Amino acid sequence: MSGMGFNLSQGARLGQNLKLSPRMLTTMSVLQLPLGELEERVEQELQENIALERTEPDGSSTDPGDARTDGQDASDGADDRALVVEDGGAADFDRLDRFERRYGEELDSDSWRESRRLDGEPDARSEAMANTPARTASLEEQLLEQWMLVDASPRMTAIGRVLAGFVGDDGLLHTPIESIAAAAAPVVDPPATEPEVRESSRLFQHLLEPPGMGAADVRESLLSQLDVRRGRSGDDDRAWHDARLLIEHHLDDLEANRIPRIQERTGMTTAQLDAARAMLQHLDPSPASGLTSRPVPGIRPDVIVTHDAATDRWSARLADGSEPSVRLAEEYVRMSRDPKVDKSTRDLIKSNMQRGRWFIEALGQRGATLLRVVDRVLDRQRDWFEFGPGHLKPLPMLEVAADIGMNVSTVSRAVAGKWLQTPRGIVELRRFFTGGTHTEQGAVSWDAVKERLREVVAAEDRAKPLSDEAIAKALKAEGITLARRTVVKYREQLGIPPARLRRAHPGT
């Protein structure tokens, strides 16, 4: 066995190591925040940094330059050093404790908020809590609330409680009945059986609102909904029976729009088929969709775009609240200059003031950068604002970055998650940065191509809808060359069904 040896040596290695200063990190992180997250970040900074306070509507902001002390000019280069709490922070906490005892009553944040409330001014935290939407009840909770009102036996009521937990967000059961029966078996004595679970499912479909919930599949749910609607209307004409026949035996043909085949197999006239299909239009294949829909979070624009008719000029401005106003707390500025305050406390305050300056500067740079980017968008995409989506032009983000003299990553951060309020509605800023192709009329974006594809389909003869190949030829006649597979991709992205599903049969 050979021996093992160690070799120790020294050598030099040349390399580059990029380190971002805390100031730069703050600027980049603030730049990419959308308005909602920016407000959360501002609240966080106000909570964590004792040297920051929110600017009052009638107050004047503090100039960060005025907050310097005589001994600070020489340490301006410390902007790029990290803020580090040494020795576990014990000394800093002791200084803060002494500071709180000395100035606590004057600067206590809770007392300040209370005084604002007494003065009739709104408190941002209280307003945010008041405006937070309450948690909506889950589908299972809503089903159980209705199920408790159903006049059923105690045994069936217990089985129904178990069944409610297996109803999916679409209102249907995606678990086999035998598995549900096994889960319900322990809740009753003797154990629940499959027929009892099916009976519970039937009661769900016919007695709960909306009808059809708790069915094993779409066909069963639609049949239950049809029966409930027929019972409520009191009618029993042929249309109801024809509609039931379509659901039971021809649902696949209906989905594929194979109307001639249905007429051939059922012997229905066009008028009878139309009456039956009219009944089906009131049914929902996902009956619980109205109970499980989640509210879409509101979109708050960062920038408002307006048009001045007198000068025929488009302009942009920051939306109200898109640049939250914070400043260095005047009391801490005064204390940082007060020789009566011990040096260690002044140093701690100055560190927080420095961090506060970086944050205030980052807020200002965020707004200025965002407006510069939007101004370039207004110049390059003027046709979109004036004539609509079909006139969107290709606009690589790299070109905008070069125009305004910034790095493309900076532009990307400025664009991320931002929205514009325009005369054409609220639009995501990133939408204006898109690739495209060249046509006989000039450069056109892919979004504009999709819009033109939509218009071609909308103008077609529904009795003879255009195939994907025909759509490609129609676009080529306008100078837009697309492969058939590209037409298929764009059509699917736009939610346009294929030609056979778009066909309108005679009499329908």
Image (cartoon, grey):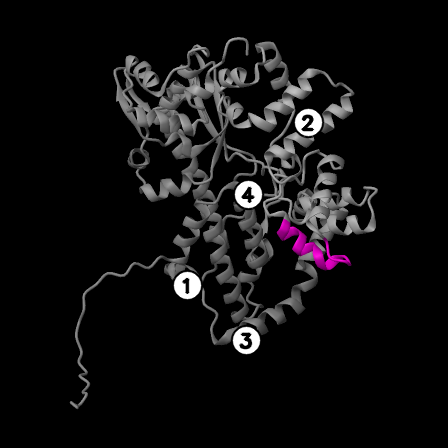
State the image quarter where residue 372 is shown: top left
Determine whether the residue tagged by mark 3 lies in a helix, strand or loop: helix
The quadrant of the image that shows the N terminus is: bottom left
For the residue labelled by badge 1, is the local secondary structure a helix, a strand or a loop? Answer: loop
**Residue 247 located within the stretch drawn in magenta:** no
Which of marks 2 and 4 precedes in the sequence? 4
Using the image, tell me which numbered label, if any, was put on residue 36.
4
Which amino acid lies under the numbered mark 3 shown in the image of this protein?
Ala
Q: Residue at the location (18% across, 65% down)?
A: 14
Dominant secondary structure of the magenta stretch? helix
Direction from residue 387 to residue 104 in the image, left or right: right
On the image, the x and y values in percent for residue 268 come to 58, 14
Q: Residues within 10 Å of mark 3 (few under 14, many from 20)?
A: few
| Badge nearest the viewer, 3 or 2 | 2
Identify which amino acid the numbered label 4 is placed on: Gly
Q: Nearer the viewer, mark 4 or mark 3?
A: 4
Q: Looking at the image, which is closer to me, 77 or 450? A: 450
- On whether residue 185 falls in the magenta region, the answer is yes
Q: Earlier in the sequence, mark 1 or mark 3?
A: 1
| Span of residues in magenta | 178-192
